[in-house]
Amino acid sequence: SATVEFVAEEAWRETVTAAEAHARAGGDSSAAAEASWERATAVYGSPLADATTLLARLDVAELLGTSRQLSAGGDADLADLVAPFVDASASASDDSGDLSPRHLWPLVARVHLRGPFAVTAGGVLLRDVPGLADESASRSGVLERVLEAADSLLLVSSINRAANDKGAKSLLPLPLRRELLDSGYLGDLAFIASKADLLTPSEVSENLGLSAGTSAAACAAARNAFTAHTLTHWFHEGCPPHLLPASRSPLFSGWRERGCLGHEGLRFELPVFPVSSRDALVL
């Protein structure tokens, strides 16, 4: 089952008011105001009417501050029911033709999922929050609040993005890395590299310098190892030497050749778990 909690009326009023101000300024306003405009247009459409008119729309107003219970017989059915409330690509319009929000996700504060899920059988509470580089000020605020109370942090991204320098740097921003190192929570961070089963062997072989004819399984294993070491390197890039952890595992033999050794003697391996596309959906 699932419980969908909608944002409070006052919070949505602030969003719509900021969106109206952004529109009147011709788009020349703060990033937070732009994020509010994006959320409002996702709900009401564009161009936006004035804030008073928008806030008077009953189809939206009746949702604010309320919650909705959803039930299904299986995981797949529950996912279909929840999708309109969390998926930015899902339309909220019904089949009746009545006026309704174009999209519901900007109106949702959080969604609680409950069920006999194997991944939470031991009492683990998982919270899926917006990405670290989310441009929305409101979603970034959600992330910060959750991080303050979290016991562990799992970063999830496609292995194709994580395995290149630019992607790794964007996934591990320096402020986050320094905070984890400085506060002693380094061991509470792990990285989930999804879609590890999707690859083109010839492309991986060329990129990693593997011999021609290397099997798909060997290419996948090589990419998994390279991804782990790339993320470990970027995790320490730019961090003061005195914050670096003690030795924990042998140096990757190819680091020096690839210029990936950020600090001499660095041996800590960031926990990286490559998972298949199906496993990522289960998580």
Image (cartoon, rainbow, N blue to C red):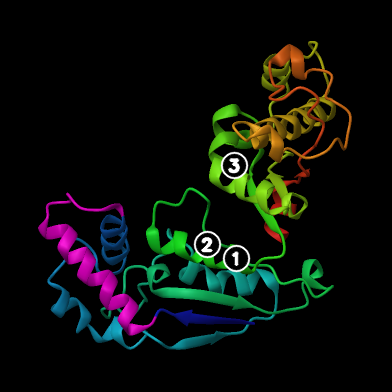
In which quadrant will I find the N terminus?
bottom right
Question: Mark 1 vs mark 3: which is more N-terminal?
Answer: 1
Q: Tell me where residue 37 appears, x and y as whole percent.
A: 26, 61
Identity of the amino acid at label 1?
Answer: Glu
| Structural crowding at the residue carrying mark 2, measured as other residues with C-alpha within 10 Å and reported as few (<14), some (14–19) or many (≥20) | few
Q: Tell me where residue 151 appears, x and y as whole percent.
A: 72, 65
Mark 3, residue position: 172
Identity of the amino acid at label 2?
Answer: Glu
For residue 148, the mark is 1
What residue lies at 83% left-to-right and 38% top-to-bottom?
246
Specify start and end residues of the magenta stretch as a single range: 8-31
What residue lies at 73% left-to-right and 79% top-to-bottom?
115
Which type of secondary structure does the marked residue at label 1 adopt?
A: helix
CB atoms of marks 2 and 1 within 8 Å: yes
For residue 144, the mark is 2
In this view, the residue in front, 163 or 275, is 163
Q: Quadrant of residue 71?
A: bottom right
Does the image show residue 3? yes
CB atoms of marks 1 and 3 within 8 Å: no
